[in-house]
Image (cartoon, rainbow, N blue to C red):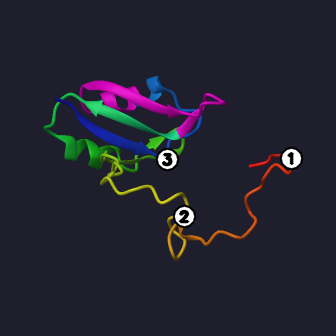
């Protein structure tokens, strides 16, 4: 199984081929994922590189961290999983959960706030 690295401070003109070429000197590359902007299609300035072997990951990080790519020093470290939100089954509080006193359902109703059709008999 591969080991995933986070590569930051990439130039916005960077391509997957350029990132792959920079890292292939230090090991076998399994995958390169360059994060791109949805609207413009250009690089967002970071990428994920997956290496085939787990051995020598520390040496790849130490060699590539601070290395220049198109005049910019790269920031390379191990990629960490994003913390996933945990849904504990707590009831939905109506939206304004960060307000003191709870959500909308905790507010008192005003008299006459319910509109009625003046022509209806009921």
Q: Bounds of the magenta span?
A: 20-44
Q: Position of residue 52 (x, y in %)?
A: 20, 28
In this orientation, which residue lies closer to the viewer: 116 or 14? Answer: 116
In x, y percent, where is residue 56?
16, 40
Q: Judge the density around disc 3: few (<14), some (14-19), many (≥20) Cα neighbours within 10 Å.
A: some
Tell whether position 34 is magenta.
yes
Q: Nearer the observer, disc 3 or disc 2? A: 2
Residue in the image at 26% along x and 33% along y: 26
Label 1 Cα crowd, 10 Å radius (few <14 / some 14-19 / many 20+): few
From the viewer's side, name the closer residue of 46 and 59: 46
Q: Name the residue tied to disc 2.
A: 105
Q: Which quarter of the picture shows residue 92?
A: bottom left
In the drawing, does residue 39 fall left or right of residue 18? right
Q: Which residue is mark 3?
A: 9
Residue 6 against residue 29 in the figure, above or below: below
> Could you tell me how far apart the alpha carbons at marks 2 and 1 are, in whole angstroms?
30 Å
What quarter of the picture does the N terminus occupy?
Answer: top left
Residue at mark 3 to residue at mark 2: CA–CA distance = 46 Å
Work out how far the residue at label 1 is from the one at label 3, CA to CA, in angstroms: 67 Å
Is label 2 in a helix, a strand or a loop? Answer: helix
Query: Which residue appears farthest toward the left when viewing the image?
Result: 55
Q: Which residue is mark 1?
A: 119
């Amino acid at each position: 199984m591969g080991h995933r690295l986070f590569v930051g401070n990439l130039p916005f003109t960077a391509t997957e081929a350029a990132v792959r070429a920079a890292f292939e000197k230090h090991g076998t590359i399994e995958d390169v994922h360059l994060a791109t902007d949805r609207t413009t299609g250009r690089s967002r300035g970071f990428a994920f590189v997956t290496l085939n072997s787990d051995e020598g990951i520390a040496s790849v990080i130490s060699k590539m961290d601070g290395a220049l790519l198109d005049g910019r020093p790269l920031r390379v470290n191990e990629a960490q999983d994003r913390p996933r939100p945990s849904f504990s089954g707590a009831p939905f509080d109506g939206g304004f959960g960060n307000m003191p006193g709870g959500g909308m359902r905790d507010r008192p109703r005003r008299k006459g706030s319910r509109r009625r059709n003046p022509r209806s008999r009921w």
